[in-house]
Image: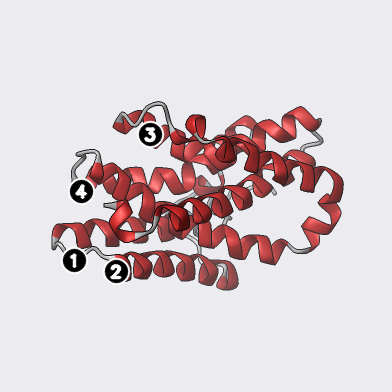
Amino acid sequence: MLQQLFSPSLLHALDLVGIFVFAISGALLAVRKNLDVFGIAVLAEATALGGGLFRDVVIGAVPPAAFTDLGYFVTPLLAVALVFFLHPHVERIQNAVNFFDAAGLGLFCVVGTTKAYDYGLGLTASACLGLVTAVGGGVLRDVLANEVPSLLRWDRDLYAVPAMVGATMVALCLRFDVLNALTSALAVVTAFVLRLLALRYHWRAPRAWQRRSTAREED
């Protein structure tokens, strides 16, 4: 179905762009953690490829695309080189990085859901794997960096929720047999815009009702 929605060359190009931006976020965190060049490369690769690898292993798409296409492995290394030598300049364009990161989030949640469904999973499971495709790399990045994953922290702008919305839209389109290039693009744009709005207005998920703890999350 993916081939029906997007041309292979377009899908591959969009994948590489998303991988590159995700890798930048991993590399920047590694620099902030004062890791060496190997650590920077590990965090960049994990962030860029972690979600897709998990999805492919679960659905049986083996060997995963990350191991059959050299571009998937090399692209994060280009991000590593950029951040290693120019990280002060990359930090200064964080808003641009966030913009493309949001675009990658929208694309990966849609592609992940569709690919899982193509391999025979049900709608709910496909949507869950779409979410994992979009946010799994970031979770792996934070775990490797010894941090609480960002999507679990109350003091972080919504990240998983936009991906959930995009994946759910794809699942509903599949359910009613209306998934096409237009509705797929709409799901991508919806997740993308929700993430940008969350960044702009600092939308956050609610915490427990009438909670008694006054503990504050450390920066």
Q: Splitting the image into 4 quarters, where does residue 35 fall?
A: top right
- Pointer 2: residues within 10 angstroms few (<14), some, or many (20+)? some
Q: Position of residue 21 (x, y in %)?
A: 62, 52
| Type of amino acid under label 4 | Leu
| Point 32% across, 52% down: residue | 2
What amino acid is found at the position of numbered circle 2 in the picture? Thr
Mark 3 or mark 4: whose residue is earlier in sequence: 3
Is 147 placed left or right of 118 in the picture? Answer: right
Amino acid type indicated by mark 1: Val
Q: Is residue 194 visible?
A: yes
Give the structural element (helix, strand or loop) at label 4.
Answer: helix
Give 22 or 1, whichever is nearer the viewer: 1
The residue where tag 2 is placed is: 183
Q: Nearer the viewer, mark 3 or mark 4?
A: 3
Mark 3–mark 4 CB contact (< 8 Å): no
Q: Are marks 2 and 1 in contact (CB under 8 Å)?
A: yes
Task: Report which residue position mark 4 lands on.
Answer: 123
> Who's the residue at 68% across and 48% down the image?
24
- The CA distance from mark 2 to mark 1 is 7 Å
The x, y position of residue 116, in whole percent, is: 29, 42
Which residue is at a point 37% across and 28% down the rendered structure image? 57
The answer for how far apart the CA atoms under marks 3 and 4 are is: 16 Å
Circle 1/circle 3 CB separation < 8 Å: no
Q: Is residue 12 above or below residue 77?
A: below
* Mark 3 nearby-residue class (10 Å; few <14, some 14–19, many ≥20): many
Q: Amino acid at mark 3?
A: Asp
